[in-house]
């Protein structure tokens, strides 16, 4: 089996998949902690459906580079969703659900009315579930992904303390002179970038898993913000690596295999947290 | 010169006025208690003073060169905080965020301020504990320590004793009194008129009746006699 793995690792497309997979897993898990704590667990799902709708429009318009349309639309939606504060008419979870469902149906509708290829359901399926697109990456995609991931990670590290302050208590941060609005905006933009990136890997439907599972698993075991963040990042990277390798060896779909690994990690962490908690008492 | 002067202030949400024509001022070293019935706009007033929401009309002016990052705030707990994984030190340190500006990381000065605030609240031993595992009284001390990190002059407290047992409540009031004696100006929202009368130097009563003045004036005013009287014999003690 190891021989087979080594043999596969020689192929550039496998190397690309590993690089992109690990980077996306890392980025999404970093922000996942904040999103879960802000009760925005489902924003990954919502935004990815928006991205799906935007992709449908891009396909109909025959754009050569659909990123030019998908990224701005997703960013605007992210900003609008996260802007919803305490006194808005539509609460955060309802807003996410609304946008998510609406964008999904419009995307599918547009694809049906203006079919760009003969295999519509195949197209929809691969956009939603990611199918094998991670194994067909071009070198150009990889560089784009590396550049954006580095940008996201640098932003996260520089903003780490501000993200903590704004997540833990936005009112306090604002009252004592932190520009919470600006950081929320930046956070929304970073999240949109990650979602659009991650669509290549696991597709629309499974992005939520990449965002929430590592964070929730880490929260079972660790008790400080820093350790939870680090643990989530490590878990996410390990699961992505394992998932991609298993899917190559066993021929399973990449996205679902990664999420499968994430759920197993969550189960392990849950039990671990239970045992550790029990020992303390 | 007054630290904070409020003239003809009306406040509320989305055009709906909750309280209007409020006039009061806070001088350095004052201990102002804001009392009033539920829904009379106490928290809204505090949020307006902190510029978290815009007033409907009227003016809030600050004096003595009071800057935004010299104000400490102890808000009511939010539901997000109940299961937030964070150590006490991380939370207290985040009180220094307002002073950091664009600086990405905390400096030595910030860490010293956090250590000092922990000591002042008597919770140095809890520094590495997880916030969500602490008792209600301990959590309030952590948030008060965080507010201390943020404030140089003025401290705003929104019902700091909600949900605390009598011992923790007394401890909390004791701590706040001590801070006031050390020169910090306090503005506190309270449900507890007996405590307000016992600790505050000034009382602002809002709601159907409005009163502002010193505690002594409050006790002989109609509003004060009416509400303090309802509390039974407690205020005689």
Image (cartoon, coloured by chain):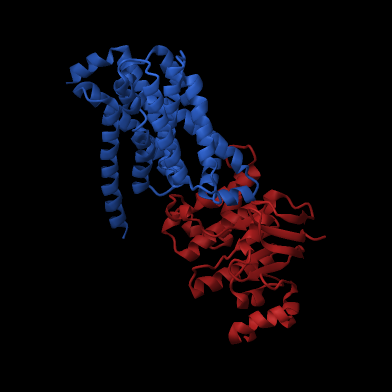
| Front residue of B81 and A193 | A193
In this rendering, is residue B54 above or below A9? below
The answer to which quarter of the image holds residue B41 is bottom right
From the top left corner, tell me how far across and down residue B45 is, in percent. 66, 60
In this rendering, is residue A89 above or below A44? below
Residue at image point 34% right, 28% down: A128
Residue at image point 49% right, 69% down: B164
Residue at image point 71% right, 54% down: B56
Residue at image point 49% right, 68% down: B163
The answer to which quarter of the image holds residue A55 is top left
The answer to which quarter of the image holds residue A118 is top left
From the top left corner, tell me how far across and down residue B20 is, in percent. 72, 63
Q: For the view shown, which residue lies furthest in the right direction?
A: B1
Q: Quadrant of the C terminus of chain A?
A: bottom left
Q: Horizontal placement of B111 versus A62: left or right?
A: right
In this rendering, is residue B111 above or below A108? below
Q: For the view shown, which residue lies furthest in the left direction?
A: A1
From the top left corner, tell me how far across and down residue B24 is, in percent. 76, 65
Q: Judging from the image, what is the letter of the chain drawn in red? A: B
The total number of labels drawn is: 0
| Residue A156 in view here | no
**According to the rendering, which colour does chain A have?**
blue
Q: Horizontal placement of A68 versus A250: left or right?
A: right
| Residue B37 in view here | yes
From the top left corner, tell me how far across and down residue A85 is, in percent. 55, 47
| Front residue of A108 and B123 | A108
């Amino acid at each position: 089996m190891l021989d087979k793995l080594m043999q596969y690792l020689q192929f550039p497309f496998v190397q690309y998949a590993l690089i992109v997979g690990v980077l996306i897993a890392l980025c999404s898990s970093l922000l996942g902690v904040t999103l879960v704590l802000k009760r925005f667990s489902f924003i990954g799902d919502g935004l990815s459906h928006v991205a799906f709708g935007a992709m449908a429009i891009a396909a109909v318009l025959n754009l050569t580079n659909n990123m030019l349309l998908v990224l701005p639309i997703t960013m605007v939606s992210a900003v609008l969703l996260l802007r919803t504060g305490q006194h808005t008419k539509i609460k955060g979870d309802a807003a996410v659900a609304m946008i998510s469902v609406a964008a999904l149906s419009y995307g599918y509708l547009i694809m049906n009315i203006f079919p760009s290829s003969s295999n519509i359901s195949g197209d929809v399926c691969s956009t939603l579930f990611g199918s094998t697109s991670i194994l067909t990456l071009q070198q150009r995609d990889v560089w784009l992904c590396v550049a954006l991931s580095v940008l996201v990670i640098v932003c996260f590290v520089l903003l780490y303390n501000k993200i903590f302050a704004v997540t833990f208590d936005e009112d306090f941060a604002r009252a004592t002179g932190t520009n919470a609005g600006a950081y929320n905006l930046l956070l929304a933009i970073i999240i949109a970038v990650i979602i659009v990136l991650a669509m290549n890997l696991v597709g629309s439907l499974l992005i939520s898993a990449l965002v929430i599972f590592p964070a929730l698993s880490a929260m079972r075991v660790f008790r400080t913000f820093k350790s939870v963040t680090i643990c989530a990042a490590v878990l996410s990277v390990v699961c992505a690596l394992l998932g991609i390798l298993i899917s190559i060896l066993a021929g399973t779909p990449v996205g679902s295999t990664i999420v499968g690994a994430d759920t197993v990690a969550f189960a392990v962490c849950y039990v671990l947290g239970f045992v550790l908690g029990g020992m303390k008492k | 010169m007054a630290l904070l002067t409020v003239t003809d202030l009306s406040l509320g949400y989305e055009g709906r006025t909750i309280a209007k024509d409020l006039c009061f001022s806070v001088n350095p070293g004052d201990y102002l208690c804001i009392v009033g019935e539920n829904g009379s706009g106490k928290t809204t007033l505090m949020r307006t003073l902190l510029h978290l929401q815009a007033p409907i009309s009227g003016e809030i002016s600050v004096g003595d060169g009071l800057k935004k990052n010299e104000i400490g705030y102890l808000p009511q707990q939010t539901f997000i905080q109940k299961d937030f994984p964070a150590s006490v030190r991380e939370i207290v340190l985040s009180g220094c965020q307002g002073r950091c500006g664009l600086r990405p990381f905390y400096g030595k000065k910030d860490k010293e301020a956090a250590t000092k605030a922990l000591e002042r609240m008597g919770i140095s031993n809890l520094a590495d504990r997880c916030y969500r595992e602490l008792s209600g009284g301990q959590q309030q001390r952590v948030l008060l320590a965080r507010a201390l990190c943020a404030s140089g002059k003025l401290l705003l407290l929104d019902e700091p004793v909600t949900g605390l047992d009598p011992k923790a409540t007394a401890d909390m009031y004791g701590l706040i009194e001590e801070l006031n004696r050390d020169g910090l100006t306090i503005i506190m929202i309270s449900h507890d008129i007996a405590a307000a009368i016992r600790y505050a130097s000034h009382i602002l009563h809002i709601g159907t009746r409005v009163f502002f003045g010193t505690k002594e004036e409050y006790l002989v005013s109609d509003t004060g006699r009416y509400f303090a009287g309802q509390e039974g014999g407690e205020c005689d003690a």
